[in-house]
Each structure stands twice: as C-alpha cells, then as structure tokens.
Amino acid sequence: MTSASMPPATRPDGRRADALRPVRITRRYTKYAEGSVLVEFGETKVICTASVAEKVPPFLRDKNQGWLTAEYGMLPRATHTRGDREAARGKQSGRTQEIQRLIGRALRAVFDLEKFGQRTLHLDCDVIQADGGTRTASITGAFVAAHDAVSELLASGQLAESPIRDFVAAVSVGIHRGVPVLDLNYLEDSDCDTDMNVVMTGAGGFVEIQGTAEGEPFTREQSNTLLDLASTGIGQLVQLQKQALGLL
Amino acid sequence: MTSASMPPATRPDGRRADALRPVRITRRYTKYAEGSVLVEFGETKVICTASVAEKVPPFLRDKNQGWLTAEYGMLPRATHTRGDREAARGKQSGRTQEIQRLIGRALRAVFDLEKFGQRTLHLDCDVIQADGGTRTASITGAFVAAHDAVSELLASGQLAESPIRDFVAAVSVGIHRGVPVLDLNYLEDSDCDTDMNVVMTGAGGFVEIQGTAEGEPFTREQSNTLLDLASTGIGQLVQLQKQALGLL
Amino acid sequence: MTSASMPPATRPDGRRADALRPVRITRRYTKYAEGSVLVEFGETKVICTASVAEKVPPFLRDKNQGWLTAEYGMLPRATHTRGDREAARGKQSGRTQEIQRLIGRALRAVFDLEKFGQRTLHLDCDVIQADGGTRTASITGAFVAAHDAVSELLASGQLAESPIRDFVAAVSVGIHRGVPVLDLNYLEDSDCDTDMNVVMTGAGGFVEIQGTAEGEPFTREQSNTLLDLASTGIGQLVQLQKQALGLL
Amino acid sequence: MTSASMPPATRPDGRRADALRPVRITRRYTKYAEGSVLVEFGETKVICTASVAEKVPPFLRDKNQGWLTAEYGMLPRATHTRGDREAARGKQSGRTQEIQRLIGRALRAVFDLEKFGQRTLHLDCDVIQADGGTRTASITGAFVAAHDAVSELLASGQLAESPIRDFVAAVSVGIHRGVPVLDLNYLEDSDCDTDMNVVMTGAGGFVEIQGTAEGEPFTREQSNTLLDLASTGIGQLVQLQKQALGLL
Amino acid sequence: MTSASMPPATRPDGRRADALRPVRITRRYTKYAEGSVLVEFGETKVICTASVAEKVPPFLRDKNQGWLTAEYGMLPRATHTRGDREAARGKQSGRTQEIQRLIGRALRAVFDLEKFGQRTLHLDCDVIQADGGTRTASITGAFVAAHDAVSELLASGQLAESPIRDFVAAVSVGIHRGVPVLDLNYLEDSDCDTDMNVVMTGAGGFVEIQGTAEGEPFTREQSNTLLDLASTGIGQLVQLQKQALGLL
Amino acid sequence: MTSASMPPATRPDGRRADALRPVRITRRYTKYAEGSVLVEFGETKVICTASVAEKVPPFLRDKNQGWLTAEYGMLPRATHTRGDREAARGKQSGRTQEIQRLIGRALRAVFDLEKFGQRTLHLDCDVIQADGGTRTASITGAFVAAHDAVSELLASGQLAESPIRDFVAAVSVGIHRGVPVLDLNYLEDSDCDTDMNVVMTGAGGFVEIQGTAEGEPFTREQSNTLLDLASTGIGQLVQLQKQALGLL
C-alpha cells in the first residue's frame, strides 16, 4: 500500500492514516538502571528500564545460558479514570500478564541467551501516561534500554560479544471507521473494528502478529493491508531506535 | 495452497501437512450443564461446559445486555509431567489467563450480547489430556456447548431469538522443521519455528490471528501459507461442529 | 444387619437400602499418568491419577522414605449449579482441603512409605460430575490408580517390593428419612439426618470413621447399623477394585 | 467398659485410662465479648469468645434465621516449637480450617438458628497453650461462651426464647500403646495408633465421631471401647459446664 | 540553631548541614489527573497525582463527608539494585504500607473532609528514582497535587469552599557521623545514627514526628536540634510549594 | 514538668495526668516459650513470648550474627466490636505491620545481634484484651520475655555473654481535651488531639518518638511536655521490669 492510496486524513488527531505519532526516545532517563529509557508515542509515555542481575532463575541453573524477562505496570492514574493499584489489589490482571509475556517474547526473539552468560536481563516497562499503544511503545523502548545495558556489559568486559542479533520494535494497526490506520491512539483504539499488534525485527521478519476483531471479523485483504502499514511503521521505529542509540 | 503442493508426509504421527487430527465432539458429556461437550483433537481432550446464570457482572448492571465469559484449566496430570494445581498454588498462571481471555473474545465475536438478556454464559474449558492445541480445541468445543445452552433457552421460551450470529472455531498452524503444518500436536508444537493460533467464523472471517516466532522470525509468505492452512482446517472444523449439532 | 431386615426400597433411585450404586472403574483413562482411573459411583464421576515424582518434600529429605499426598478438585460445573473455580478465586475451600487431607490419610494407611524410596506419589482426584459421595469414590479410585503406578515401578525394576500393604476403599452411609442407607446420592445426602463416611482396608479394619449429625443427634445403635452397612459396601468395593485390577 | 476392667495406670502423666485431665472453665475471661471463657484441659488452654453481630451472611439474607460460625487459631508459640503465624503466611492451614468447621457444626447441632433472629454468633477459639485436645476443649468452652452470650440477649429482651436446645461437649479418645485412653495429651496423641474425636450432646446423642487410624487399622470392638470412654468423659464435661454456668 | 553554628560542610554532596537539596516541583506532569506533580528532592523523583472520585468508601456512606487516601509505590528500578515488583509478588511490603498511611494522615491533617462532599481524593505517589527522602518528597508533592485538584473543583463550581485549611510539607533530618543534618540523601540515610521524618503545616504546627535511633539512642538535645532543622527546612518547602502554585 | 503543675484529675478513670495505669508483668505465663510474659497496662493485656530458633534469615546467612524480629496480632474479640481475623482475611493490616515493625526496631535497639550467634529471637505479641496502648505494652513485655530467653541461653552455656545492652520500654502520651496525659486508655486515645508513642532505654535515651496530630497540629511546647511525661513513665516501667525480673 502506498500512502497515495490512503483516504484523506480523518483521524481524530489529524494524522494521515499511515503516520506514526511523534516518537521520542530519551535514554538515561533514570540514573541507576543499566539501561533506562523514556519512550513516547504521542501522549503515551513509558519508562523502560533494563536491569542486569548476575543470576538465572532455577529452571536455567547450570544450563550455561542467560535469561531475559519483562514486567509491565501502569501508574494508577496513567489513564482517564484512576485504576486500582495492582500491588494493593494483590495481583496482576490478566491484561498485565498478557502484555508482559508479549514483551518478554519479543525481546527474546532477538536475544541470543547463550551469549549472555549466567545473567538475567529484567526489563521493566511502567506506563506513566497511556494514550493507546502502551505495549508497542514498551517493546520499542525496552529494546533501546536492553541495548544500553548490553553496551555497558561489553564496555566493562563482562561480555565479549553482544547477544543482540537484530533490532526489534512494535506498532499497532487497526481498522478505524473502515479505514486501516497505523499507531492508534486511545480514541481510535476504543472505537475500532480490528486491532492488530505487530512485532518485527530490523531485518523485517515477523516476531508476533496479534490481530483481534473487536466488532466484525476481518478479511484476509484487511489483514494484508494492516501488515503493510505495520511494516512501514516498524521500519520507521527501527530508524528512530538507531538514531537514539547514535548508530545512524 | 492446495494439498497437492505439500511435501510428503513427514509428521511424527504420519499425518499429511494439511490434515487435522481425528476430531470428535461428544455432546451431553456431563449431565448438569446447559451445554456439555467433550472435544477431542487427537489425544487432546477438553471438557467444555456452558452454564447459564441469571445475572450479569456489576459493570453491566442495568445495561440491558448479557455477558459471556470463559475460564480454562488443566488437570494437574493432563500433561507428560504433573503440573502444580493452580487452586493449590493460589493463582492462575499468565498462560491460563491469556488462554481464557482468548476463548472469551472468540465466543463473544459471534455472540450478540444484546439479544441474551440479563444473563451470563459461563464457558468452562477443562483439559483432561493435553497433546497440543488445547486452546483451539477449547474454542471449537465451547462453541458447541454454547450452542446447546442457547438451544435450551430457546426451547424453553426464555429466549425468543438466538444471540448466535455465526459459527466459530479455531486451529493451530505452524512451521515444523521448515514445513507448514496444520493442527500441531505437542511433539510438533514444542519443536516448531513459528506457531500460529487462528480463530475464524463459519463465514470465513478472521476473529483472531496470534502468530509467534519461536525461533527465527517468519516471513509474509510463511504467514500467508499458514493462514491458508488454517482456513482449510477451520472450514472442516465448522463442518464437524454442524454434524455434531445435527445441522447437516 | 442382614439385608432381610431392611425396610422396603423407598430410595429416590429405587435402590435397596443396602445397595451400592452401579460402580465402574476404568483404568488407563488418560495416557500420561503412571496410574489413571475413571471411577463412577452411579452418576458421580471422578478422574483419579497417580503421578510418581522422584523427590520428597523438604520435611522428609534424607529420611530414607517416600511420601504420598492427595489433591482434590471439582470442575466448576460438576454440580447442579456452577461453583466458583478455586484457581480463579485464589484459594481452595475448607471443604476441599478437608477432603484432600482425608484421601491422603486413607491411602497412607495402607502404604509403607519406607518401602517407596525417595519418591512422592501424587494422587489427584478431580470430580467431573458430582452426585454425592465424591470423597468416597475418590479414595476408592485413587487406590486403583496408586496400585497401577506401583505396578509400573515394580515392572521396571525401580521398586523391588510393593509398598502396598492392603486394599483400601470408602463409602458413605447415612440415615435418610429414618432409614439407614448405603452409598447416598446427592438427593439423599442433602436431605439426611446423619451422614457418615467410612474408610476400611481389604482386611476389614477401620481407617477412618467420620460421622456427622446433620439434624438430630444419632444414637449408638444407629452408628452400629451404619457401620454394618458400610462394612458390607466396602467389602463389595474391594472386590470391584480387585476385578478392575485383574486380581480375581 | 467399667473402669474396673482398665489396666493399671501407665499413662505419661499417671492418669487412669478413663480419667479426664483437670478441667477448668473460667467465665468472663476477657471483658468485651458477650461470652468469654478460658477453658483448660490440663495444660491445654483455649480462649473461647462468643460475639453477637446484628447481621447474617449474604446466603441467609431475608431467610428469617440466624447463623453461627466458628474460627480457630493458635498463638505461634502455643506449641513446643514455634509455628508460623497464619496471618503472616497469608492463609489458614487445612488443619485450622478443618477444626473450625468442626467447631461450627458441633455448636450448630444444638442451636436453633430460627430462634436466633437475623443475627450471627461468632465463636472464636484461640489456643494460647496446646497440649493435645485443642479442638475438643474449644468445643467444650465455646458452648459455655455461647450460653453466656445467649443469656445476655435473653436478659436484655433481645431474645424471647433461648435457641439452645441442649448442651454439647467433646473429648478425644485413642488407643495408646494398646490401651484405650480418654482425653489424650500431646505426648499420647503423637504416639497413638488410633485417635478419635467425639462430640456429644447433654442428652447423650452423637453429633460427630471422627476416628482415624494413625498406625494399624482399628477394629469394631476398639471403636466401641473408645465410644464408651468418650461417653463417660463427655458426661463429666457436661456436668462441669453446668457447674461453671451455675446450673447445678 | 542558626546556620552560623553549623560545622563546616562535610556532607557527601558538599551541602551545608542545614541545606535542602535542590527542590523542583513540576505541575501538570501527566495529563489526566486532576492534580499531577513531579516533585524532585535532588535525585529523588516522585510522581504525585491527585484523583477525584465521586464516591466514598463504605464506612463513610451517608455520613455527609468526603475521604482522602494515599497509596505509594516504587518502580522496581527506582533504586540501586532492582527490587521485586509488589504487584507481581502479590502484596505491598510493610514499609510501603507504613509510608502510604503516613502520607494519608499528613494530608488529612490539613484537609476538612466535611467540606469535600461525598468524594474521595486519591493521592498516588510513585517513586521513579529514589535517593533518600521519598516519603517526605511524596507528602510535599502530594499537597501541591491535592491543591490543584481542589482548585479545579472550585473553578468548576463543584466545590463552593476549599477544604484545604493550611499547607503541609515534610522533610527528613538525622544525625550523620555526629552532625545533625537536613534532608538526607540515600548515602547519608543508610549511614546515620538517628533518622527523623517531620511533617509540619504552613503555620508551623507539627503533624507528625517520627524519630528512630538506628544506632545509639538519641538525646533530648539532639531531638531538639533536629526539630529546629526540620522547622527551617519545612518553612522553605512551603515557600517552594507556594511559588509552584503561583501564590507568591 | 512536675506533677504539682498538673491540672486536677479529670481523666475518665480518675487517674492523675502523669499516672500510669496499674502495670502487671507475669513471667512464665505459658510453658513452652523460652520467655513468656503476660503484660497488663490496666485493661490492656498482651501475651509476649520470646522463641529462640537456631537459624537466621537468608539475608544474614554467613554473616556471623543473629537476628531479632517481632510479630503482633490481636484476638478478634480483644476489642469492643469483633474485628476480622487476619489469618482468615489472608493478610495482616497496615496497622499490624506498622506495629510489629516498631516492636522489632525497639528491641533491636538494645540488642547486640553480633553477640547472639547464628540465632533468631522471635518475639510474638498477641493482644488478648485491648484498652489502648497495645504497642507500648507489647514492647515493655517483649523486653522481659527476651530477657528470660537470653537468661536461659546464658544458663545453659549456649551464650557466653548477654547480647542485651540496656533495658527498653515504651509508653503512650497524648493531649486529651487540652491536658497532656500519660498512658492513654482507649477512651482517651480515641478522643485525643495528639498521640505520641515513645520508646526509651533504661539509660534514658530515645529509641523512637512517633507523634501524630489527630486533630489540631501540636506545638513544640506540647511536644516537650509530652516527652517529659513519657520519660517519667518509662522510668517507672523500667523499674517494674527490673522488679519482675528480680533485679531490684
């Protein structure tokens, strides 16, 4: 799909259908973590930290490899109305667990755990303001935080070779009022027929496709259009990750 | 993709790449539930019950519609090695929650909640033997259980019109040792590069696509091949649902 | 008590007061567990699996003996109205814990843990349909599952000698509308004055007697009549266990 | 069995086989509860309080009857070695739940809930020192506390008629080194073949019999001997309850 | 105590003993909350939001007053080494609960709940970077967030009169290596003999004094010196609150 | 402050403003614990036990020192109206955790953990009747229990030298209807403007000061008056501890 074929802009924030929101990636956002990134997809803001621990979980003991795991949370008032604090309620919601499992899988897809030694990389993604796309922003930001943590291990000689095999980033796409659009904000997300989260590598391979019909089922053609939009968007996000890391 | 183009059968159980495992759908499996189905995808066996409750959760009170929700569980020794009992451990795993959320969304996609009255339909999917594909078998069986429960409400005059808009079924597809295959068993599932769960309606619309690269990222072409396989398989499953319901 | 002295059959299902419901014991019901039994006492159906784990709980470490423990559960719609899923609620009820403790004690009473090595035998009893007597069916079926698991260990040479000292089975008895009856179904159980669960060995020794006055207190004579009924019933159950195991 | 036929005293504390430990029942032990009793069976000491709440649990709403429920706990150092505090661990053990369910059933057996109005009687039994028989002491003491609470409601005119139909008390019996004995202390309890807890009414009816073979199975004759011992003991306990209440 | 009498600066960060760290109060930090403040005490950074809910907790229903409550949390990597995520662990630590109770009491001390209507003000204090003094920064920032939320209610006419009676702020003081110091950072806090958190109103009244001897007990004289330091510091904090609110 | 300057007795129980309630310290209250004390501050009654465990928590392993920790609880009917049992609710309240953390800190302040060996001293404070001041009574009683436990270790040669460096006791003070008073009972506590809990050593050093304005903020002068009252009271409590221990 070329942008020429897109319908005129009718999106709530005036964006073209194939446009990302303004993306900002701020490194070294907090001072203790080996990697710390504030990632912004428009009004969605997530703090992603990467913490290195010199041990692995029990199921990997003595297996001569490392581990990478992710956790996700939202501040209670990251959203329009205040949500319960999960720590106070005593458990993480199904949604939270689903998202943090997704983030972990996405990052492990580009991470060679055998080259990471007996270490765990903890990625914490905490949403301080939510306007749609928190999971895709989390993946995109967590990659940069993980890259910084690995760079520090390489610089200090704790790692001889980088376990990172490729870039990874994510974006949402969806069909909003009949129009396939890229990078939905909350208004669009809560009013769309189909919602798809896509995770891809820098080389353009798919790591995850999660498409859900919220209203009417979607067709193969719609799916293809959405994957086209996502590919374009993720290509841009990977460029932004590289710029943020000073690799361009 | 036609089956003619498939490579010769190399699957662990001798199946063709595009063949479902033997599927059995046994209705009225237990006696109390409004709908009760034992669904078998080969050696995977799931008891799916549909229970009607004459109330709705608090967030729907006074909204003049019904609700449909699903829960999923596995008997501790449904698997090769015994797993912890979630009730004894005191919480459901992230995997369990992810699956039951998927089942619920899949069924709601073909269910008109406004035609269901102030009722909740509880779908319980309990795996008594697991050999891969428990979530897709659950969705496929739960639909039949839901259909039976609705038929009972129609027969008794409690519902005037069916809230069910279409059939829904699900199947897994994946790339096993380079070969795209349909309906993976456990052996294939634990050794595949890409795993995709697909939920479709009887009319052939997509409700969910959840594809994950377990090893290498997958390509657009592979994704298309997998979706072809899934469409074929789900078409067959819907036929089997109709046969089981005596609608053919 | 001889059956001659029993009053004419007035039981809801037409049984004689001293008659068991039809009992079926199906071995190798699921395929992974070392022992797997579907036990049916009339409409009560329980899947009992025996799983061998090559380790013992911490309190037995280095004590040169094994352990045997039981867990119990009900599918949410095993009953007339759907019950909460204990895994979702986050804890097992007092009733569940009481029953699984009883099952474990009953089986340990005929099991020589010192002859079992540094192993644990997990017995899981999951009720898929409940019509009274789920705990007694569980004990009766779990014994057969345990026997199969032990036979496998003997056959493979992992055990030199069987730790099983005797058979064990269980039945409920009660006073229903003034009549002492054997093996109560749900209708009787929910409308009886006294309810007693009895566990006995193949040799006729008592392992557990748990009698409760639901309405009026019961007398010593009634207790004796109930224990007579139970002895007869358990004798028959042990015969059925032997038949199922091919030992008759 | 008459005491004449008992073997010479060989019990650890020098008691005759058919002798209770010294029993003390102290009313108004703490000052706020409607009934508050310290009950001592030898070195076993339990604080039993009865609290009246002017409401019933949801399942009894609008049913025009009351409710009675019991809870049980042990101070962490009520025992030889310190046990975990259940409040800190975050759950009550299976043993605790089993005991508090027993206490509740025992008291409800002599309590006419329909005469209690829309009220709940909470019985809390907290063991401050344990030397065997904590559940039987709890039942025996809780009855006195309940009686005091009811008397207060009668005195104040809140109840017109007592819901208490009879006395209820409990005692343990067991076979210790071959000798049937009454009211086991901890030393005997932890070294006995058969352990039986018996709950009876003042009129001599059985409310609960819970007999467990800890080692060898027990015979019908042993069961009868134990029930004889229990009947004698409970008869004495009911007299002590009456004395404590000033009803003799 | 005048600053003239202070020993020469020996603090890790070169501050005078009676100097606050640089304090920054950023209002409208996130966009949804009625009040949203980023408060920084040096390297300690806390997001404080004030959320208005149009209901009160059950214990205040029909009492014609409002409620104010606080919750506190830390991002896992707010600290030198990553801490467990409380939501994942399933409970808030004792420290967390202690702090959020303190914040709530501090704010209620200057808040007239009877003038707040049937509303709840939720104050959420989430630490994104911790370098000592997180609870005092939280109180200081939460006041500003609460003030903004109240101003919005006043502006919209939902409140006729402000329930805020005075300012409130907090600071820590302690004896570090023998020297009484104001506003300890983490290095000082983890190496001090006495640690005191003080909450005061704008008018100079004490709301909370919480002093703890970490090593040697402290004297009355030391306590007085610390309270002097705290009074000075809180006076400055209240000025900074007023500046931030544009009230100076 | 001398008692001469106190206003005439107006306290609910007729005490002078600077008078403690009758204090009783009963050692060896229960029989198993190494130290077991019933402490009474008027109608407040707390059982304090000290239990020695021959191990330390993980964070102290191989650090050649011991540990001391406290837990606190209330029987459900220790208070005017029955409170929920924390073990049944599944968690300790914030209040409970705050109190047990305070007790632990207070005792550790006079305890040289390096002289205690690889042991843990568990202090359990369980309130059987509450009339204000349960935390201060707990600290005062726990010290005596700890002292007894240490004496036993010294007597048996398990410790060569006492780890106890000084006495420690606690008392509450407050401003009740304008009058500064010592050792508040429940009536005063629930109706006071300022409430302060003070922990001091035998030598007169401060271990904890926790002052809270319940209504109006308090002044420095009021704080000083309260600390004077507390010092006097704690001096008397330490004398009573010494008497109880036979050290006077």
Image: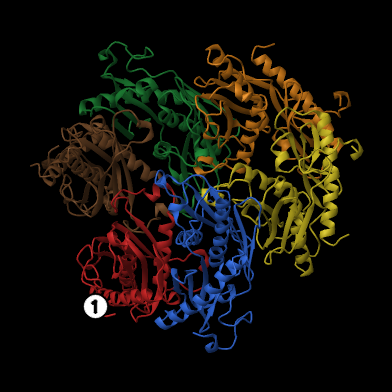
Chain colours: A red, B blue, C yellow, D orange, E brown, F green
Count of marks placed on residues: 1
In the depicted view, which residue is nearer to us: E147 or F107? E147
**Relative horizontal placement of residue C1, taking residue E183 as reference (left or right):** right
**Relative horizontal placement of residue D192, taking residue E23 as reference (left or right):** right
In the depicted view, which residue is nearer to us: D242 or B238? B238
Is residue D145 among the parts visible in the rendering?
Answer: no
Badge 1: residue crowd in 10 Å (few <14, some 14–19, many ≥20): few
Q: In which quarter of the image is residue F104?
A: top left
Is residue D52 among the parts visible in the rendering?
Answer: yes
Q: Residue furthest left?
A: E248
Q: In which quarter of the image is residue E43?
A: bottom left
Q: Please give the chain letter of the residue carrying mark 1.
A: A
**Relative horizontal placement of residue A155, taking residue D217 as reference (left or right):** left
Residue A53: where, in percent of width, then height?
A: 40, 65
Residue A81: where, in percent of width, then height?
A: 30, 49
Above or below, comparing residue C42 to residue F86 in the picture: below
Above or below, comparing residue A89 to residue A125 in the picture: above
Q: Quadrant of residue E119?
A: top left
Secondary structure of the residue carrying numbered label 1? helix
Quadrant in which the C terminus of chain B appears = bottom right
Residue B87: where, in percent of width, then height?
A: 57, 51
Q: Name the residue under label 1.
A: A3
Above or below, comparing residue F88 to residue A108 in the picture: above
Q: At 81% from the left edge and 59% from the top edge, which residue is drawn?
A: C244
> Given the image, on which type of amino acid does mark 1 rest?
Ser
Residue E185: where, in percent of width, then height?
A: 25, 50
In the depicted view, which residue is nearer to us: C123 or F110? C123
In the depicted view, which residue is nearer to us: A239 or E19? A239
